[in-house]
Image (cartoon, helix red, strand yellow):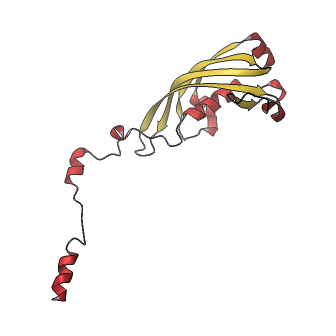
């Protein structure tokens, strides 16, 4: 990472999410793809990776179990440190990634950024979700009030 940071290297990527996560997918059946760039610099003697990505994830809505297209657009800035002791010297505005021996995987950096961008529970907007009843169904639905006449019946029994 030191050579990349010292040289101000840029690495462009385009990767399918299924390949990125493999069997470690956060949700079953995650699909889609992301593309973007990692730009390496040095800040305060620490290697820094500026990551920007965009794309889409194809997930399953947990309300209606239908496909859900989720746009991804994210940027992150991480300090790449070799030891946990070096992490203490990283400026607070940077996230920290441990890179033993000065090495890390670009895929790991991308995977972490995608995980931060994905919702914990993917859901359609309420108006777009197939699990929502139609407006006509809501109008026909009556509210049952089993105790509505209870006071009246109790008065009859008292007399």
Q: Residue 93, image x and y in percent?
A: 67, 28
User: What residue appears at the point 79 percent right and 33 percent down from the top-left corner?
Assistant: 88
- From the viewer's perspective, is 99 left or right of 128? right
Q: Is residue 69 visible?
A: yes
Q: Residue 45, image x and y in percent?
A: 80, 20
Q: Is residue 104 visible?
A: no
Instruction: Give the answer, above or below, for where 114 lies relative to 54.
Output: below
Q: Residue furthest bottom?
A: 159
Instruction: Give the answer, above or below, for where 75 lies relative to 141.
Output: above
- From the viewer's perspective, is 83 left or right of 12? right
Q: Residue furthest top?
A: 7
User: What residue appears at the point 64 percent right and 27 percent down from the top-left corner?
Assistant: 110
Instruction: Give the answer, above or below, for where 5 lies relative to 154.
Output: above
User: What residue appears at the point 69 percent right and 28 percent down from the top-left corner?
Assistant: 94
Number of numbered markers: 0
Q: Residue 16, image x and y in percent?
A: 57, 26
Near-viewer residue (91 or 146): 91
- From the viewer's perspective, is 151 left or right of 22? left
Quadrant position of the N terminus in the picture:
top right
Quadrant position of the C terminus in the picture:
bottom left
- From the viewer's perspective, is 146 left or right of 111? left
Q: Residue 112, image x and y in percent?
A: 64, 32
């Amino acid at each position: 990472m030191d050579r990349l940071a010292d040289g101000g290297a840029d690495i462009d990527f385009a990767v399918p999410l299924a390949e990125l996560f493999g069997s470690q997918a956060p949700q079953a059946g995650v699909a889609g793809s992301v593309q973007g760039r990692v730009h390496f610099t040095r800040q305060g003697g620490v290697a820094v990776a500026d990551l920007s990505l965009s794309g889409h994830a194809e997930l399953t809505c947990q309300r209606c179990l239908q496909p859900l297209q989720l746009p991804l657009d994210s940027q992150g800035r991480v300090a790449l440190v070799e030891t946990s002791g070096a992490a203490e010297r990283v400026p607070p505005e940077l996230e920290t990634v441990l890179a033993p021996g000065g090495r890390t995987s670009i895929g790991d950096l991308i995977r972490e950024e995608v995980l931060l961008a994905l919702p914990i529970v993917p859901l359609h907007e309420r108006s777009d979700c197939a699990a929502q009843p139609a407006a006509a169904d809501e109008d026909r639905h009556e509210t049952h009030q089993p105790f509505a006449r209870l006071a009246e019946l109790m008065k009859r029994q008292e007399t």
